[in-house]
Image: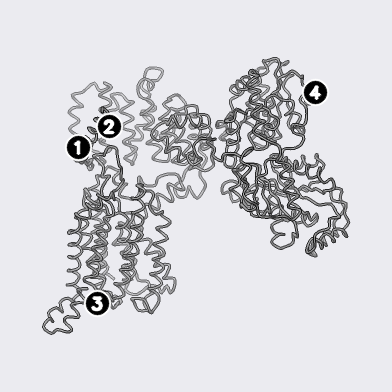
Amino acid sequence: MIYHLVTYLFDTVDALSFLRLFQYLSFRAICAALTGFGVTLLFGQRIIRLLYVNHVRDNPRSHGALSSASKAGTPLMGGLLIVAAIFASVLLWSDLFNRFTLVFLCALIWFSLFGFIDDYRKIRHRDSDRGLSQATKLFFQAVFGLGFGLIFLLPGLSPVSAEIASELYLPFVKDPVLDLGWWYLPFIAFVVVAIANAVNFADGLDGLSIVPVSFTVVVYGVFAYVIGNAIYSGYLQFTFLPGSGELTVICAGVFGACMGFLWYNAYPAQIFMGDVGALPLGGIVGTLAVLLKQEFLFVITGGIFVAMAFSVLVQEKIGIKWLGRRIFYMAPLHHAFQYRGLAETKVVIRFWIIAGILAIIGLSTLKIR
Amino acid sequence: MSQITSKQDAERPPDEGAPKVTAATRTTEATAAAPKPPVRKRPLTYVFTGGGTGGHVYPGLAIADEVRARDPEAHIVYIGARGRMEASLVPKRGYPIHLVYARGLPSGRQPLALLRFAVCTGFGVLQSLFHLSRHRPRMIVATGGYASSPVLLAHWILKSLRLSGARRCFVHEQNVVPGKVNRLAGRIADRIGVSFEASLRYFPPQKTTWAGYPVRREIGAVSRDAARASQGLPADAKVVFAFGASSGARSINRAVVDALPRLLAQPDIHVIHVIGQTRSPDYDAETDTRNRLERLDIAGEYLSRYHQSDYSHEIEKLYAASDLVIGRASAGVVTEIGVCGIPSILVPLPYAPGDHQAVNARTLESRGAARVVYESITAEDGQTIGVVDGERLARLVLEILDDPAGHAAMSRRARETFDRSGLDRIVDQLDQMLADRLARLDRPEDHVSSNGRPDDPGGPGGPPASALSPFALVRRFAEGRDEAFIESLGEDYLKYRVDGFLKNERWPIRNEGVKLAGLLGYRDRLPFLLALLRDRTPAPFFQRLLGGDYRQVGFIRRNAVSAIGRLGVYDAPVRAVLLDLLADPYYEVRSAAARAFADLAHGKETVDADGERDAEVLNGLRGLLRESSFEIRSAAIRALGRMGDGAVAEWLRPFYQDPNGKVRQAVIDALADLVGRKMIVDLDGLREELDDILVTSNHFEPDFPIKRTMNRLIGMIRDQQQTR
């Protein structure tokens, strides 16, 4: 909104032409990041208290001894904080008539809503198994994926031009490898569902998912900046997507919100994000990947998430359900490391390091192609 | 009524079983069936179908008899499965029978068996189509069992092609929980009659009605004296009549033979034993029973009071002659002996659909009309088979027979529980259907009494069925034996449930059974657990490709080992099996075996006959120290500490700087164990060595002091509340 206000002002009042600064993506991105961070920091304490008082807690237990070694009782639904901060920064600093922005906001709202329903059910029934079933979650994700795919492929609605909407790009390769046509629709649905779930699996230890998510978002932000800029995209031989630069601002806002949440979520956590956080974060990363036509970049940058999702699938579906044996000690992967005798902090920081390295490798695909 | 039908009619070769009607009259009937009310000059044709086992044939025959009694003109044809019970039973009753191909749906996913089933049923449907078009019955009565599936399918085809005219289809379900065929039949039939209120919910409500079980007229019509005279039994004897189902039951047959020495030792007891005609490769009733009899140490003159036969067509006489029945708890048997008022010992067929036999048996037991003996299981030649303890059976029989007052009470209660109006109700229903009054049925509210059964296997007042699922039971007993719950259910029944899980085809269920055997401390299942662990039948090909190994999957083996650890029996077979498992292909089994050794074999048991340490086990455990999995290494190290002597400390030295902290922790635990058991002589040397153990760790436990103080506060409050 500040963006629109300022644009109006310097168009009409000559004296305010210095406000042109606000047109620059880089400046707005920094502002968005600071806003996201500031909002979480500012409201964090209050929200944590509010959630706790209202019994929005993990493993809520009315009576009985508390285990001094367990984190049970930590407030849940910290995702509300993240989502609110992202909303604030996007509303303030980005171009709200940009189609990329609109699609992003849809994703954020959709995933937050059913994430909220899921958490709400868990809390109301005081049972972490009573949330939405896996099938229901998949259904909601798939509905969004298909709707999003439809908008993406319809020339009148799509944020990208019709010629390139259905083309498939790979990292390290300059030109599109394949035009999928309408087959791109199920592909989009798959990408969104897969990424959303992968991020969801990673939400198991304090700070484990939030940092890799912010790394991934930063990488996509940089890509958005390059792809949305005619000169840079020409220089680095990307297909120019007009308007996608706006996603840089959004990514920065998400990054800021994530950092602000980490402030409270760092070990030992004062708050857990819950599904209301994990689902939207996964959903928006998936949406970003599709919007920037960099779906396969996620396999590199979000390698941590891919590995976790893979370990869960192999362990649950092949091992436990079918073969009647374990294939890993435990799944998702981070629990396997804990089982081997690594403390939670150690596991989390090692995963951050790996995520950072993967992010750097992801960034290198900007030039190496 | 199509041309095809008429053509076949015209070409129909005259045979003695078919109705003596000319083609001309049939055509009249065919045209008459459509618009105007039918003028019935020719006899009505009924097709009866159902079978595979006697339990499905007898109700059909009972209904057929009643139909014929009401309308002697009625023309009745039976269509049954080739080579099954009905092939011999039906002609004996004087009804013509056509045999068609039919086959039961194979359990599990065996592609070959499924194919055979499909081909067989397809052919059976063709045959049935032919028979149906030839006889053009006005009524099809199906009594369940796979033999009825081709006929029902054929009827369904004709009906959907609108070739069946005014034909009606009535399906009777005998059991509380319907079988597969009848569930399907519920969609095809015009009316479904059920024997138990509880089964109403399995069928479409607008066409289902409670009818009861059709008890044949002969049952209970014979006087006791006449029956005894006809069977050559003395009038004052105590007669025990034992039989499996029509196909015989191995567990009952063997238990009865085992019980003979005790039973026949009483001079006035006669035993009638109908062993059934089973002749499968697994079990041949006749030879098996003969072999068992020969092994028996029993005086020859006793055997004159043992009357064995492989099948009886006059079961009503045997009922009438007997004082006690030992048998399966199928709806038919239960109702028949109930109507006759005979006390019974029921051995439910384990894992019949919905476990309905156990439900029947427990209901009767709770009403004081019967006693229940459950099968337990044993592994024989790699197969899981049911067994009944003959000793126990004999004791129970004598207990009932030696207590005339109790016997009379059981008899009275049995008679109170059942009535025999089912047959009338069913045939009334048929008449009504033929009169074209297929009005929408109201839910029957008024048949609450009689054979209405609770549909939960926990029995009346017991826990709901959902609490008896394998997973629910494991959850319940994970914390220890819930004695109140066991009490409410009956330990016998619980054991029987566990046995059912243990012999289940699906491994996830079997797995829960294994867990339960351990959690509930069923030591008598130890041989079975050992047999499971010895079972090295490979898993299906595709599973092996992805890392599966044996049919008894990794989880089952792991849990069986843990269960053995809980049972706390350490003898030679256990030791041998555990020793083998130290080389199991699945890592969790190897570590579980090491843990089981640690749990079971410490202290004096590990010393063999010469007072030496059990070197073989120790060396086996030592072999595990080379494993790459830290879990196995730690388990083996702990077990060595528990079982070994001072020499073991030597083996642990290479692990002082193991990269995995849990392994190092195990080393320290093991050394502590050895020191505690005073196995280490050179304590100074050990103390010096300890400095070499790497004690930094990647692990720590978090501690939230605020929660500890909170707990203290809560504790104080609770104390004061209690003292107040």
From the viewer's side, name the closer residue of B222 and B443.
B443
Residue count near mark 2 (Cα–Cα under 10 Å), binned few <14, some 14–19, many ≥20: many
User: What's the amino acid at mark 3?
Assistant: Asn
Snapshot quadrant of residue B436: bottom right
Dot 1 lies on which element? helix
Q: Rounded to the nearest whole Å, what is the CA distance between mark 4 and mark 3?
A: 108 Å
Residue at 57% in and 42% down: B354
Residue located beneath label 1 in the image:
B709
Query: Percent from the top left, x then y, of residue B275?
Result: 70, 30
User: What's the amino acid at mark 4?
Assistant: Ala
Residue count near mark 1 (Cα–Cα under 10 Å), binned few <14, some 14–19, many ≥20: few
Disc number lying in front (1 or 2)? 1
Residue located beneath label 4 in the image:
B229
Residue located beneath label 3 in the image:
A229
Residue A190, relative to residue B585: is it above or below?
below
Residue located beneath label 2 in the image:
B652
